[in-house]
Amino acid sequence: MTSMMPDVQEVLIPSSEIQEKVREIGVRVTEDYRGEKPLLVGILRGAFVMLGDLMRNVDLPCEVDFMDISSYGTGTSSSGVVRILKDLEEDITGRHVLVVEDIVDSGLTLSYLRRSLLARNPASLEICALLSKPERRRVDLEVKYLGFEVPDEFVVGYGLDYAGAYRNLPDVCVLKPEVFGAG
Ligand code: 5GP
């Protein structure tokens, strides 16, 4: 229970399930990258919560870096053209890169980002996302490590925001409609 609960219409995925799933993904990543030192790339800002939990479940030497991107588009629909607001600090040539994202919606943002990172010649590039909205997908995108599929509803919590708020909710939630009206 948090003080933000009055704004929540429904808890879609409780914290305990998220933690369990992130642990499972951590085990898979540990097995898949055995002998390597992967670079986990968090997409700001939504992915920082998952990245922190995931990293502590990866039993390998690994490094972390961040990118901040903004998608050109109007309102809630992304155009798929991505502007890099903050680029990686690390050179990813020859590195095993695992991109960690909060949610894949149309898939346009990640598919653009994937192409632009591949041009830097990493040894490998895979995608991990906490959530996916399959109904909304507009491009084919392989998400190797996926937490949960969610319906086509706007969700917040565990890193995901609405107007900058609710990232610190431990559960993934749907907000009450009146919250959006007030925003
Ligand atoms: P895509 O390019 O896949 O359409 O857009 C993905 C981005 O849209 C995510 O990184 C996230 O910032 C935003 N997004 C999509 N759906 C949601 C949602 O339900 N809640 C929040 N907070 N952000 C979303």
Image: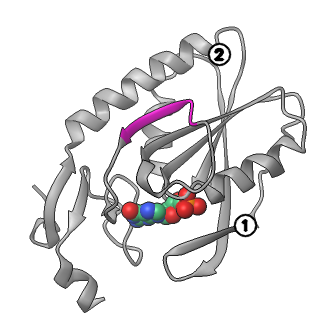
Sooner in the amino-acid sequence: mark 2 or mark 1: 2
What's the magenta bit mostly, secondary-structure-wise? Answer: strand
Residue occupying image coordinates x 65% and y 26%: 62
Q: Residue at x 70, y 8 (%)?
A: 35
Residue 34, given in percent of the width and then of the height, sits at 64, 9
The residue that label 1 is drawn on is 82
Residue 33, which numbered label? Answer: 2
Q: Which residue occupies the extreme bottom position in the image?
A: 182
Q: Residue at x 49, y 57 (%)?
A: 105
Percent position of residue 117, x then y: 81, 46
User: What amino acid is at disc 2?
Assistant: Tyr
Tell me: 166 left or right of 4. right
Per the image, label 1 sits on a secondary structure element best described as strand
Residue 71 quadrant: bottom right
In the depicted view, which residue is nearer to us: 52 or 47?
Answer: 47
Front residue of 148/87: it is: 148
Q: Is 27 above or below relative to 148?
A: above
Quadrant location of the N terminus? bottom left
Q: Residues within 10 Å of mark 2 (few under 14, many from 20)?
A: some
Looking at the rendered image, the quarter that the C terminus falls into is: bottom left
The stretch in magenta equals: 143-148
Q: Nearer the viewer, mark 2 or mark 1?
A: 1
Q: Is residue 116 above or below residue 24?
A: below
What is the CA distance from the residue labelled 2 to the residue labelled 1?
Answer: 29 Å
Tell me where residue 82 appears, x and y as whole percent: 72, 66
Q: Dot 2: what SS?
A: loop
Left or right of 107? Residue 16 is: left
Q: Is residue 17 visible?
A: yes
Seen from the viewer's position, the closer of residues 5 and 127 is: 127
Q: Quadrant of residue 84?
A: bottom right
Name the kind of residue labelled 1 in the image: Val
